[in-house]
Amino acid sequence: MSGRNFFGMNVSRRRFLATAGVLAAGAAGVTSAVHARKPFLINPCRDPALDALMDSPWLAKVWQGLDPAQVWDCHVHLAGIGDSSNGLMVGPRLQSLWHPVLYAQRLFYMNGGCVSTEPGTVDENYVRRLAVLAKNMQPGFKMMLFAFDWYHDDKGQATPGMSTFYVPDDYARRMAAAHPDVFEWVASIHPYRADAVDRLEAAAAQGARAVKWLPAAQNIDPSSRHCDAFFAAMARLRLPLISHCGAEKAAQSASMEYFGNPLKLRRALEAGVRVVVAHCATVGDDEDLDQHGGKRTSFELFTRLMETPEWQGRLFGDISAIVLRNRKPEVIRALLERDDWHERLLNGSDYPLPGILPLVSPGALASSGLLPPEAVADLETLREHNPLYFDLALKRALNWKGKTFPAKVFATRAFFENR
Ligand SMILES: [Zn+2]
């Protein structure tokens, strides 16, 4: 079968599934046979209403001790294929079949977001679906939508050909304005651009709740003096920085991957910026810059920063994506066990990733002793209806020897609102 599929492109279904299979087996480390009963690769994107699960104890547990109005999902990607007039663009590497892994990632990304087949409506449908999912949580719950700035060269020139994707600040801002009951927005501003501080001030005035960077994909060295003016403005405006640390598949080169080293964020911390390390740096290795070389896990370096007394109250971590299959159970256990850190952890979903079936395995988490086995079936059903709800229910159910994430990890609103 060939023709337009839900990705809005001419790709044979067989070829997509073949590529998808390679991605799932390679990137997600899937070795078992296709699950007998549950969909395995492709999210069936069922109705977000949860009637079938109304009696589930795991669903009841989600809001226990939690005021939905305080729950802001602090890590949500705006995605699409650029088929609206909103300025959103997908970089050449994600569009090309010559880069099958990135290409398949993009296809999965769209399926994770349950985007329809109709060309010309993909961007719009992505946001519409997201709003519907959020409205099917509890009233008051909100998501923070990420913009994504261009790759810029060392001189601060935007370089679309090197960019993985581009989501303008203005698009994120307008989507939040269109659905103020469920969305907030987060700006993305490259610190090397000549107008970086002006843009930051404009974003703050227009209600941005934070700034998001993916240093390894955007060519940002957070330890560069070229960031100083930007950090000073961030500290003055009291806007937090959410920065990706650890391994990054979208990185263009090994030298750029190095920009995700948690230790490079000291410059921002010293400037007085509140820094949120995305995913608590739970995947990858980085050079130990304090020991003149030698590799450590990125999480060990994050731990070193968290244990530095000066950064108490300034350094934070988001727990988005920590449940992905490429994370080791030890890091999830550590995050549950370190109750002295819980004050500094913020929940985010990394949507649409929780909707991409091969990426998160409730069964594997149960086998590692991190999830009650009785919860697995309900969570898998929940994911087919509402991946946002799934992510929250899963994190609420995580348990290691009686240690769980307390309600305050999910009540993130005050952190972003109190500037
Ligand atoms: Zn993310």
Image (spheres, grey):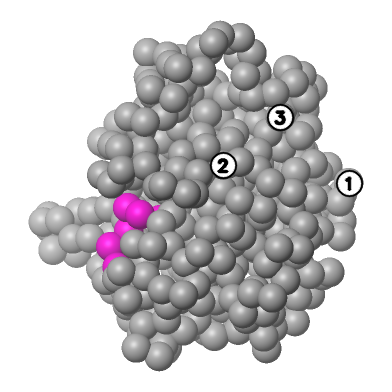
Q: Amino acid at mark 1?
A: Ala
**Which residue does the image show at 40% across and 47% down from the upper left?**
35
Residue at the extreme front: 36
| Three-letter code for the amino acid on which mark 3 is drawn | Ser
What is the crowding at mark 1: few (fewer than 14 residues within 10 Å), some, or many (at least 20)?
few
Q: Is residue 102 visible?
A: no
Where residue 170 sits, quadrant-wise, is top right
Foreground of the two, 203 or 375: 375
Report how far apart the C-alphas of labels 3 and 1 lie in the structure. Answer: 21 Å
Q: How many marks?
A: 3
Mark-to-mark CA distance, 1 and 2 = 27 Å
Numbered label attached to residue 43: 2
Q: Position of residue 335 (x, y in %)?
A: 38, 76
Left or right, 47 with respect to 316, comes to right
Q: Which residue is mark 3?
A: 116
Question: From the viewer's perspective, is the residue at label 1 or at label 2 nearer?
Answer: 2
- Residue placed at 49% from the left, 49% from the top? 38
Image position of 321 with respect to 126: above or below: below
| Element carrying mark 3 | loop
Eyeballing the image, is 276 above or below 98? Answer: below
Amino acid marked by disc 2: Asn
| In the image, the residue with mark 1 has its CB under 8 Å from the nearest atom of ligand 1 | no
- Which of the two labelled residues, at mark 1 and mark 2, occupies the earlier sequence position? 2
At which x and y percent is residue 355?
56, 48
Q: Is residue 328 magenta?
A: yes
Measured from the top left, where is residue 51 in percent x and y? 76, 63
- Rendered image: mark on residue 178: 1
Magenta segment range? 324-329
State the residue in front, 76 or 245. Answer: 76
Q: Which secondary structure dominates the residues rendered in magenta?
A: loop
Label 3 vs 2, first from the N-terminus: 2
Kindly state the secondary structure of the residue where label 1 is placed.
helix
